[in-house]
Amino acid sequence: MHINSDINVLGSLPDWNLIKVFLSEDMVSIKEKGGIHTYTAIKTDKSVKRFEKAIKATLIQNKKPELEAIISQSIKSNTTSAETLLLLFWNASLNNELLFHLNDKVFFPAFYSGRVSIKNDEVVACIKDLKQSEDDLKKWSEITITTTASKYLTLLKKFGLMEGSVNKSIVHPHLNDAMFILYVYWIVAISEKPNLVSSNWLSYSFSEKQAFLDRLLQKKFSKYFNVVYTGDKLSIEPLIPYESIYEYISQS
C-alpha cells in the first residue's frame, strides 16, 4: 500500500475553489498572473504548493482519461456542488489507498449499519491496526496518527458525507438520476473485472446492494447502459461515449 499525507493536507484545505484553479494552473503560471493572492487568501507559496500537489494527485488526476474529463467538467461547472463533491470523493478514494482503506473499514461499516456518528478513536484504532503491516506507517508518531484520523473525518465533511463540528454525524446522500448514471459509468471504468456483482466499489453507491440492482434495472436507464444480471454475475455496457455523458445528462 502506498501511503502519503494527502488526507492531512486536503482535510486542512481552507479554500476548495483552488481545485478549479489547479485544473488549468500551476504555481509558475499563478506567479506570472499576479501571485497566489490573486486566487486565494492562503498566505504562503509553500502552503499553496502542498495543496496543489495533493489536489492534483488525489482529487483531479485519474488513470482513465475519460473519467478525468468527467471530473474536470464537473469541477468547471460547480466546484462545491454536492454532485461534484461526490465525484471528488470517488476519485480521491480511487487515488488514495489509505482513504479507501479507512472508508472500507470505518466509514462504510458505520454507514450501512445505520449508525449516527463515527468517533475519532475508531479511525485511530484502524490506522494503528494497519500500522502493524504497513512499513510506510511504522514511522508515524502518535500525534500524526491522531491528526490524520481527525483530518479524515474533516475530509468526509468536506465531501458532504458528515456534518457537525465536534461531534460529526453521518450524512446519507441520495444519488439523483444524473449522479446514479455517472456512478454506473464510473464503476464500469475503474473495475478490473467485468463481473461487478462483488465489486468493492458497490458501497460507493450509498445504497444497499439489492436497492442498487433494482434501480440499475429500471427501464428509464436503458438508453444509458445495457445490463446483464443473472444473480451471480453483473455486467454493464455504457451506451454513450464517456466524453459526452456529462454534458448529455446535464441537458436531459
Image (cartoon, helix red, strand yellow):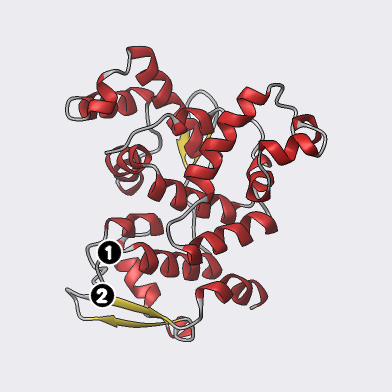
Q: Is residue 22 left or right of residue 143?
A: right
Q: Is residue 116 above or below residue 147?
A: below
Q: Secondary structure at mark 2?
A: strand
Quick one: 44 or 185, which is closer to the camera? Answer: 44
Residue 13 image point, x, y percent: 59, 31
Residue kind at label 1, given as amino acid type: Glu
The 10 Å Cα crowd at callout 2, few under 14, some 14 to 19, many 20 or more, is some
Left/right of residue 230 with respect to residue 252 in the rendered view:
left
Query: Can you identify the residue that label 1 sits on?
Result: 192
Across and down, in percent, residue 240 comes to: 50, 81
Horizontal placement of 10 versus 209: left or right? right
The answer to whether residue 210 is seen in the rendering is yes
Q: Say which quadrant the C terminus sits in.
A: bottom right
Q: Amino acid at mark 2?
A: Leu
Residue drawn at the location 74% of the way across and 33% of the way down:
40
Tell me the quarter of the picture where residue 213 sits: bottom left
Is the residue 10 above or below the residue 95 in the image?
A: above
Q: Quadrant of the N terminus?
A: top left
Q: Position of residue 107 (x, y in %)?
A: 35, 40
Residue 13 seen in render: no
Residue receiving disc 2: 234
